[in-house]
Image (cartoon, coloured by chain):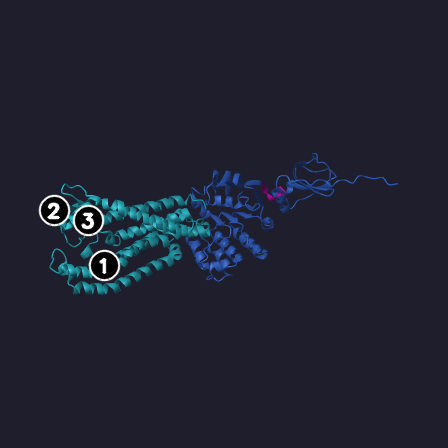
Amino acid sequence: MAWVTWRQHRAQVVAVFGLLALVAAAAFATHLPIRAAYHRNTLSECLPPTARSGCDIIVRHFENQFDSWVAIVRGLAVLPALVGLFVGAPLLARELEHGTHRFAWTQGVTRRRWLLSKTALLAAVTLVAAALLSAVVTWWRGPFDTLEGRMAPNGFDIEGVVVPAYALFALAVGVLAGLLFRRTVAAMTATLVVFASTRLIVLNFLRPHFMSPLHRSVVGTDSARPTADWLLSDTLVDAGGRQITAGREDLAVLHAQQAGIDPHNYLVSLGWKRVISYQPAGRFWTFQLIEAGIFAALAVAVVLAAIWLVRRTPT
Amino acid sequence: MTPSPLDARGLGKRFRRDWGLRDCTLTIPQGAIVGLAGPNAAGKSTLLALATGLLAPTEGSIEVLGKDPLREPSVLAEVGYVAQGAPLYRSFSVAETIEFARRTNARWNDEIVSHFLTRIASETKVGSLSAGDRARLALALALGKRPQLVLLDEPFAGLDPLAGREFLQLLMDGVAETSATVVIASHVIADIERVCDHIVLLTEGGIRLEGNVEDLLESHRILMGPRRPLGSIRGVHTVVRERHSGRQLTLLVLAAGPIVDPSWTVDRVGLEELLLAYMAPERLPTPEPPERLPLRWHG
């Protein structure tokens, strides 16, 4: 089956690694000026815990200088989905669309073994490609990770072990969608919808609660640099610890303005403070393993469903 | 006792609302060359798809070489199946297509396939083969498995008569030494007439006629005689079909013994004529007899 898989999917495999090479080349080229700026500005001396004066401006300058590049690299989060769209979805949909399954599924290799072998081999290729992508991105984001951390989604989602897990999940969803929809375009659409919504659900509803978040309160003026933690919520509370509604906040500010007092000072004098709940940067690998575990388990479940269903699918 | 190559019991398959095949009970004898005849949409492809496990029965059961093709798909290693239109990967070259079949079958015989390759460059893409060559390639792949059962679904569609004849020759050569059972589904009876020794006729999803070709031809007779009201005729079991043409009455009958009535001209029936008679609806509307002119006396 290895030959069969290679012959039928070599174009996709070449495309995957071609794209990967392109990303790596771009990453290497863009990383040169970043590294130069990183060392020239002697940012290392500004990194916590050493904080000397003037650090603020140096760090801000560095971050803003490469803002758009960081945003583009963040966009690489879509790459795992492409595996599902262009490798997973056509795997069965194209056979069913062209009727070639009537040829492939009536040979000596049973169709379950046929599907299992193909999926396993493509999953191995996907795993390697996604791991390489993750390594490249992790390396490229090194300076930014040091400054901003990678616990927040913009770093978390494209680094570490979650990337291969996302890609495997996308591949699995594509295979199952191809079996259920039997049309390549429909299967691709379904794959995109399922993959994106699963990612968003996990990101917004599960990941914040992998472990209970920590809280800290900030009183008055706190101009500290954003930390490496993943900030979940920032609530204004009064001295008694009750949450302050937007209406009450507006009223207080208006009141201060009418009385001719600086609103900020007024709020501080009331004893109001911000309560920030966050996931600390130190939990990065724990969270990575949990999230990767979720997506890998989902991928396995989806593939098993496809293998179970393929035998009873009417053609 | 070796199990029948294809054994169906009360087999039925429903597509959404309509039954593609219903109440099909059938046992194909070992080594037969079976013509699976019937008009379009009679259930021929459905029966073959059920036999290869590509479809699951709605009711009843089907066994191929004694095994349920859905529960024990490993039996497909013994079945050479060519689906309608001979689906193959268009982007594969001929050599790659053969390699595909070799790699997906534990038992493989290169001889038949190389016989095929003598005529076609192995680098040719399957997509650019002629319909005839493509059908030959698909057949060669099916035979390369050294199957005990060969199932061909409309293999002559798109073939010119010469290519069809060559195709049959290749098929007969291929199964000659293995004495495999062959089922050829075709709506053109003339294509299969020459080779098949067993007939299964499907109409509207049911078996209309089944049996050994010689027995069927032996038991049916064509009677011709002057038109008359039909009573029972000695030696006739059933009248399959009656046709009037002018004052002539032509009957296709299932005979139960010698027909001795001298007013009938008794003739043997050809396979195509027999099958066409059975394919037609149960009773064709009989045209009204022409109005008789009143006799007039002159003089």
The secondary element bearing badge 3 is classed as: helix
Per the image, the residue denoted by label 1 is: A139
Q: Which mark is residue A230?
A: none
Question: Disc 1 to disc 3, how far (Cα)?
Answer: 20 Å
The 10 Å Cα crowd at callout 2, few under 14, some 14 to 19, many 20 or more, is few
Residue furthest top as drawn: B232
Which chain gets the blue colouring? Answer: B
Is B54 magenta? The answer is no
Whichever of labels 3 and 2 marks the residue nearer the N terminus, that label is 2
Q: Secondary structure at mark 1?
A: helix
State yes or no: discs 1 and 3 in contact (Cβ < 8 Å).
Answer: no
Callout 3 amino acid = Arg
Q: Are marks 1 and 2 on the same chain?
A: yes
Q: Are marks 3 and 2 in contact (CB under 8 Å)?
A: no
Residue A8: image x %, image y %?
A: 40, 56
Q: Is residue A81 above or below residue A211?
A: below
> Is A188 left or right of A151, judged from the image as shown?
right
**What is the secondary structure assignment of the residue under circle 2?**
helix
Tag 1 near tag 2, CB within 8 Å: no
Type of the residue with mark 2:
Ser
Mark 1 on the same chain as mark 3: yes
Magenta residues, start to end: B209-216
Q: Which chain is depicted cyan?
A: A
Say yes or no: labels 3 and 2 on the same chain.
Answer: yes
| Label annotation for residue A269 | 2
Residue B94 higher or lower than B62, as above or below: below
